[in-house]
Amino acid sequence: MKENTFWSDACKYGAILGLLASISRLFEDYLIFYSSAPLERMAITYLVELLIYSVIFIYLVVRYTKRRAQRFGDQGFTFGQGFGYSFTLVILAMVVVGVARTIFIQIMGFNDFVEGYIGRIDEFEAYLAENGALAESMASNGVMGNFDDMRVALRAMTQPSMFSNIFSAVDSSAFIALILATIMGFTIRRKPRI
């Protein structure tokens, strides 16, 4: 029978989590940057999708880490083993997300991505103009001028490389991975039976 090593398990389940996270991220990217959905509908859809994705993702990390811990039987499972395994799962999943996002932007068109981003900024700025008190508050904090700077920066941006997308996905999830891995390490650990 084939032995399930740390890396074979982590790569297999990390790929599954990465596929789930990629589907979520690509849906979000499409919704925000490529679709013509109104701002309010887009925001509600995004939040509902993010909540559903988060629950499923956390459930799967817990399930896969518990499965890994059960394989150790009477040997026990330390905090470090639980932490390391669940952290590795999330990081490997984000590598898959970075690759998928690179391919998605390549297919959908980087210029359309930039124009969609600028379109959302314009839409948000128009929304703020309709809501005077919020716009005044943001203007007094200097936020309104940042929209023009964002547009200039977006137009000057070049298409990110695959490495850049992978690093961005890993970097944006590292803190959450640390928290989730710490919780998993504490809840899964158990002493060996003697």
Image (cartoon, rainbow, N blue to C red):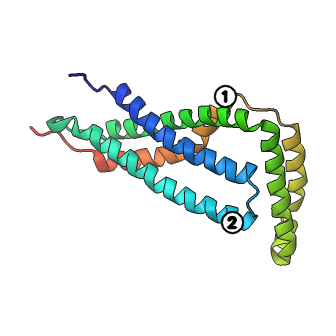
In the figure, residue 94 lies in which quadrant? top right
Percent position of residue 170, x then y? 57, 37
- Residue 64 is marked as none
SS of the residue at dot 2? helix
Q: Residue at (49%, 33%) from the top-left corner?
A: 92
Asked if residue 77 lies left or right of residue 46, the reply is left
As shown in the figure, which amino acid type bears the numbered disc 2? Arg
Residue at numbered disc 1: 162
Percent position of residue 3, x then y? 25, 23
What separation in Å lies between label 1 and label 2 (alpha carbons)? 31 Å
Q: Is residue 142 visible?
A: no
Q: Nearer the viewer, residue 151 or 188?
A: 151
Please identify the quadrant where the C terminus is shown: top left
| Badge 1 density bin: few <14, some 14–19, many ≥20, Cα 10 Å | some
Asked if residue 128 lies left or right of residue 108, the reply is right
SS of the residue at dot 1? helix
Residue at numbered disc 2: 41
Asked if residue 90 lies left or right of residue 34, the reply is left
As shown in the figure, which amino acid type bears the numbered disc 1? Met
Q: Residue at (69%, 61%) from the top-left corner?
A: 42
Q: Residue at (88%, 37%) from the top-left corner?
A: 156
Q: Is residue 109 visible?
A: yes
Q: Residue at (56%, 48%) from the top-left corner?
A: 24
| Badge 2 density bin: few <14, some 14–19, many ≥20, Cα 10 Å | few
Percent position of residue 77, x then y? 25, 39
Q: Nearer the viewer, residue 74 or 112?
A: 112
Q: Nearer the viewer, residue 75 or 67?
A: 67
